[in-house]
Image (spheres, rainbow, N blue to C red):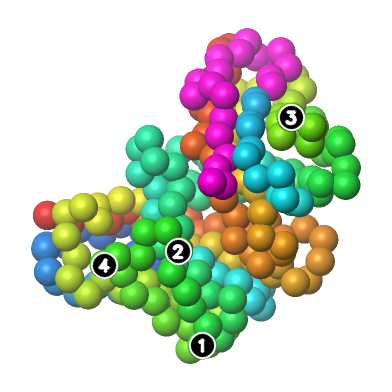
Amino acid sequence: EAQVTQNPRYLITVTGKKLTVTCSQNMNHEYMSWYRQDPGLGLRQIYYSMNVEVTDKGDVPEGYKVSRKEKRNFPLILESPSPNQTSLYFCASSNPRAGGRYGYTFGSGTRLTVV
Amino acid sequence: GESVGLHLPTLSVQEGDNSIINCAYSNSASDYFIWYKQESGKGPQFIIDIRSNMDKRQGQRVTVLLNKTVKHLSLQIAATQPGDSAVYFCAEDGSSNTGKLIFGQGTTLQVKP
């Protein structure tokens, strides 16, 4: 089944403790992206990657890092989480240069709470 | 600047009625638009898309209409069912197929039995 898999689904952590949220897709998509979703603010892009070893900042990159060493994986790293990073996070992938439909496929989400 | 917005935050309809969810976009260069559905506790799911060279596209029970003159996008759901209750987002790609989508704030559709 074509999908984007995020782990964990739920995470409660303490301020300053480094964490990684993993994202993997099995569709050979070139484009991958991380979003956070907050009430009243909608989906905001954190980082994106056009291909392996190519990453770029989205609209709200502060406090986050990403890497794209392999095509299928795009982990989101919070080196020193803070309470304002408490949010619902989504990973998404697509193939914009394949032509035709290229809407994102989203993962199921990771609900992060930083205390 | 670029933005995508929805006219109403919440839409309440009777089961069996048709629903219309609206979206306004500001980037006249956008050439690809998508509607997503997000159910509680889940990630957004692709519903239907449309390119700027079309005015209308139909799917199963859903129709997307694009009016480029007034930069307006709408999603019509026929015979709305309880399972249609969700938040609906429009999204646009104004960046010539680079892959980055800009999302609207979302409209909550509530279906009354």
Asked whether the viewer can see residue A23, the reply is: no
User: Mark 1 = which residue?
Assistant: A53
Mark-to-mark CA distance, 3 and 2: 28 Å
Q: Label 2's element?
A: loop
**Do the dots labelled 1 and 4 sit on one chain?**
yes
Q: Label 3's element?
A: loop
> Which mark is on residue B70?
3
Q: Label 4's element?
A: loop
User: Mark 2 = which residue?
Assistant: A58
Residue B72, image x, y percentages: 71, 31
- Estimate how packed mark 3 is, as few (under 14), some (14 to 19) or many (20 or more) residues with alpha carbons within 10 Å: few
Residue drawn at x 88%, y 47% as measured from the top left = B53
**Do the dots labelled 2 and 1 sit on one chain?**
yes
Residue type, mark 4 in image: Gly
Residue drawn at x 36%, y 65% as measured from the top left = A61
- Estimate how packed mark 1 is, as few (under 14), some (14 to 19) or many (20 or more) residues with alpha carbons within 10 Å: few
Residue type, mark 1 in image: Glu
Left or right: B105 as drawn, with respect to A87: right
Q: Label 1's element?
A: loop
- Estimate how packed mark 2 is, as few (under 14), some (14 to 19) or many (20 or more) residues with alpha carbons within 10 Å: some
Q: Report the span colored magenta.
A: B1-20
Q: Are marks 2 and 1 in contact (CB under 8 Å)?
A: no
Residue type, mark 2 in image: Gly
